[in-house]
Amino acid sequence: MTEPIELSLVHELRLEPRVHGGIVTYNPTIELFAGAGGPTTLQIWRMNNQIVAKNSQRGERVSVQAVRWKPDGQFLAVGWSDGVVRLMGLETNKAVHQMTICPAGESNITSIGWAQNLAGKRPVPAARPSVGTWEQLASQGLDLSKKKYAADLPRELTFLEIETALPKLSPLPASGGSGDDTFVFTTRASLEFLFRPFSQNDSDKVDVMIVGTNDGQIHISIYDSFVIGSFHYSLPPSVGNQTALQLCRSASHLELSTHTLVFKPSTEDKTKTLYLVPIDLTFIHSSPENLSLLASKTTTLQKLLRYINQVQYHMLHEWQSTRELPNRFLNSINETLKEAGTYGEMKIGQAMYHSVVTGHTFPEIKEWLVDQLAERGHKRWDKAVVTGLQALRSLVHENFLPALERISIILSRMLGIARFHESKAEIGFTSAQIMKVMDIVSCLMMVGNKILLFVMEELELFHAFSIWLRHEIDRLASSSITDDLTEKEASMEHGKILAYIQQYMPASPLRYYLSSVTTEDADRDRKLADGGSSLLELLGKQIKKQESGQDDTGSYPQVEFLCKYLDSQANSVLEGIAEAERRSVRFGQFTKIVLDYDISRFDVRLSATQMGDSWKGVTHTALITEGDDSQVYIFRTSTTITNGISSSVTAELSRMILGDGKILDLKFLYEDSLLVLWMPKAATDSPLRLIRIPHKSEDLGYQPYTAGSQIATHELTNEQVTSVFLNMIVPCQPSFVPAQMEIKEASVERGKLPPRMCLLGNDMQAYKVFALPEDPFGEALKSRREEPIL
């Protein structure tokens, strides 16, 4: 008889508010958990019940529909009812990525799966001899651990990280941004989290997210936010009745690019039917060695484009702030001069120029300077211009140009990949496309440097102008000229004052770079640039015209136009990559599961066995039903996967009745254990137990299965359940009734964590975390009887 193990309670807490809809999940690598703290609020808690983050979306009716942690615990994917999956970073409570899955209100997000696969064409490490002659060992010296083996130079160069040598990007101001990314780039922690350097240890791994909706759509993305695309799955026409399906679960294995999708009819809340469908992501298996590099770089490129767009909004905002208040002051006096009608078409600029040159001030100008503008107005004017220009200078120098440098480096890497694979269509883009994007980046860098030069010049000229303006206010307000005023006047730089009045005060040269662009102008100039002309040459011609004083309304120097053009051209490249990957996604042969009662709980696990050049993928699906909560169904479906493509599927079934107990939930742990949360019905004082079923064992008596076929059931008594299988006692009060169970594997990512079982009570508030033994199936299983399980 197997001796039971009593689990240790690690954490116990009471959640406030109640978990909505049972949506709660435990982080796989750190002691955090997330859930729906109400229909429209996402909350992340620590194990001391402290709320780490609280997030709601705009709109009272936008609710949480699904949550899922990334396997490394770095991101939390949250599906909202507006059709968007938002990825929240572990280091920040902001949504750092957003993916639109479906239009708001048209369908619901029903499942989020996040897995990791190994890329197909990965290098095989060279065999290193473990033994050698005495003379060979002696020649290596005493410290054998210091021996260095020859590096794989092409691979080392491929994954060399140049960006780490560049200065870090600076956070953006908290105000002045626009859209969903307004606050994403505003803290150092958020930037470091988003722009973590690519690790060579991850060069063979591909992160895959599969999101399903209740209208049969499957949305696939890799590397956190690089979208491959959406696919619609429906049953083959040969089946007859075309039932609308929705994805409710997915399973994967590190070694397999084939995943298993679990569908159910979308028209039914409860169902007796499930469909198991293999999906072959053959682009992972057949990918070149640098797929991980390409995908990580394109993901970083997307983030940098978002960063550049936010910098552009801030630049426009700061420049507008330097013009808004001074323009109000200048428009006011221009209206006064026009109403007076004494000086013809003369405006304030000409009047100030006259005052600087002659020392004479017109009466209207004197009244405006002394009574309206005065000392307070001058201070406001000075602060608005100086603060805005200094902020603009910092944005260009610390944010705009450094981000463009990083984009240039990524594009140069992509250009190398494109030239290497120029004869193949598998990467989805060409060197000509990358050169086009690099041309736009070069234009933005030229414009950024021009802005920087003009800002520095305007600051210098405005400083001289501001001193003169304050001197004029003081001189005109004073009844007599003092020595102090005379000394100040003698030290003024009249050339700079006149230059500012002529060149910057009425219309700053920065307007050529930081103004809004009309749709007509943008469309006209974009067509010309798309026609094959070099954008850098077109930009150079327009800048020369502007600098020579010719009137030119061209869009090329405008930051807004260039950023939008960069976005469209870069997105064209990214869409080409995604399209190349989409072409290699296929659905395999489905397996239909039909039971006598509505399915209440199920879990699915995919395992892999290598067979020469092929793999055998085996999916185990464990289910319980509402009509018979003491019986567990374990389906085993097998397929051979060759070159990333699955073949025909065979299905088998094992049925067991676990005594007179009630099965509350069931989950797979690792590839060899099905954990069943089981409570005996007969004795009220019998403890809650966790039963381990070795679902891979042939002793379970798997029999061939087709939809609706009847398979013999193995009936066990309570005594047999607790003696044949390894069982663990779950210590908890009789009043605690689990509503659902979550199992997490052991982790060493951020400190050592044992396997864990998380239970949410049926009141949606009681939450308990138990540590599973490090080797619950090793020593304990030695006491199991040697005879077959069933």
Image: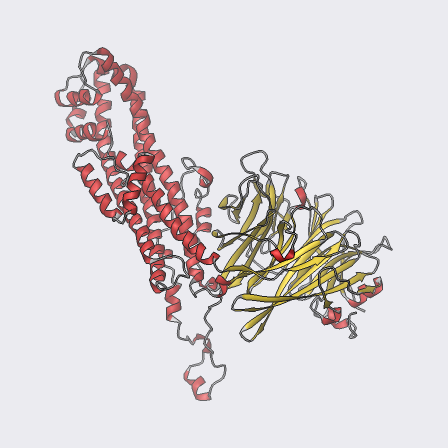
Q: Total number of numbered labels?
A: 0
Say which quadrant the C terminus sits in: bottom right
Coordinates of residue 720 in the picture (x, y in percent): 82, 66
User: Where residue 246 sits: x, y (%)?
Assistant: 62, 50
Which residue is at 85% across, 52% downward? 684
Q: Name the residue: 80% across, 57% down.
A: 630
Counting from the top left corner in percent of width and height, residue 660 is at: 84, 58
- Along the viewing direction, whichever of 26 and 409 lies nearer the viewer: 409
Furthest residue to the left?
A: 358
Q: Which x, y percent locates residue 747?
A: 59, 60
**Residue 197 visible in rendering:** no
Q: Is residue 617 above or below residue 207?
A: below
Taking depth in this image into account, of 529 and 63 the one nearest to the observer is 529
Q: Residue furthest right?
A: 682
- Between 76 and 430, which is closer to the camera in this rendering? 430
Asked if one can make out residue 211 in the rendered structure from this viewpoint, the answer is: yes
